[in-house]
Image: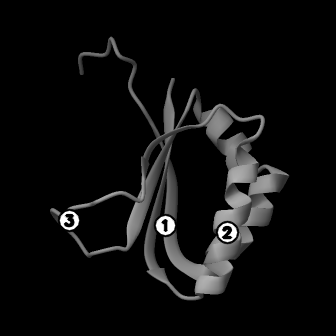
């Protein structure tokens, strides 16, 4: 079943570290079936606190999303995101196209 990784950047705390993340994170896509669905575009807050930006990445399965997140290449990039921002990241399972629930 499709899975989505949602990355929410609440606040930039160190722009230089975040620049390093932006440089290294794309390299972590190699070998993973990632489809960017939304990527730090225009946003409109309907409820809850404001945030700086968000990205949504689609993966074929939860397992593949976890494999990407825990891959050595993304672990290298992730440390810069964690040092450079206050963020929330989660994986959510999607629904199949034929689901009527």
Q: Are marks 3 and 2 in contact (CB under 8 Å)?
A: no
Instruction: Give how far across and how far down residue 86 sits, in percent.
Output: 51, 79
- Tell me which label, 3 or 2, sits earlier in the chain: 2
How far, Cα to Cα, is label 1 from label 2? 15 Å
Up-down: is 69 above or below 10? Answer: above
- Residue of label 2: 21
Closer to the camera: disc 3 or disc 2? 2
How far, Cα to Cα, is label 1 from label 3? 16 Å
- Residue of label 1: 88
Position of 99 with respect to 71 (left or right) is left
Q: In the figure, residue 68 lies in which quadrant?
A: top right
Of 69 and 80, nearer the camera is 80
Instruction: Give how far across and how far down residue 92 sits, in percent.
Output: 46, 43
Closer to the camera: disc 1 or disc 3? 3
Q: Residues within 10 Å of mark 2 (few under 14, many from 20)?
A: many
How many numbered circles does the render carry? 3
């Amino acid at each position: 079943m499709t899975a989505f990784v949602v990355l929410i950047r609440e606040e930039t705390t160190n722009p230089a570290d975040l620049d390093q993340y932006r440089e290294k994170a794309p390299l972590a896509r190699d070998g993973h079936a990632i489809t960017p669905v939304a990527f730090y575009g225009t946003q409109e807050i309907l409820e809850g606190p404001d945030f700086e930006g968000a990205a949504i990445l689609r993966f074929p399965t939860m397992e593949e999303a976890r494999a990407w997140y825990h891959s050595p290449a993304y672990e290298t990039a992730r440390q810069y995101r964690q040092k450079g921002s206050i963020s929330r990241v989660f994986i959510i399972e999607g629904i199949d196209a034929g689901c009527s629930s």
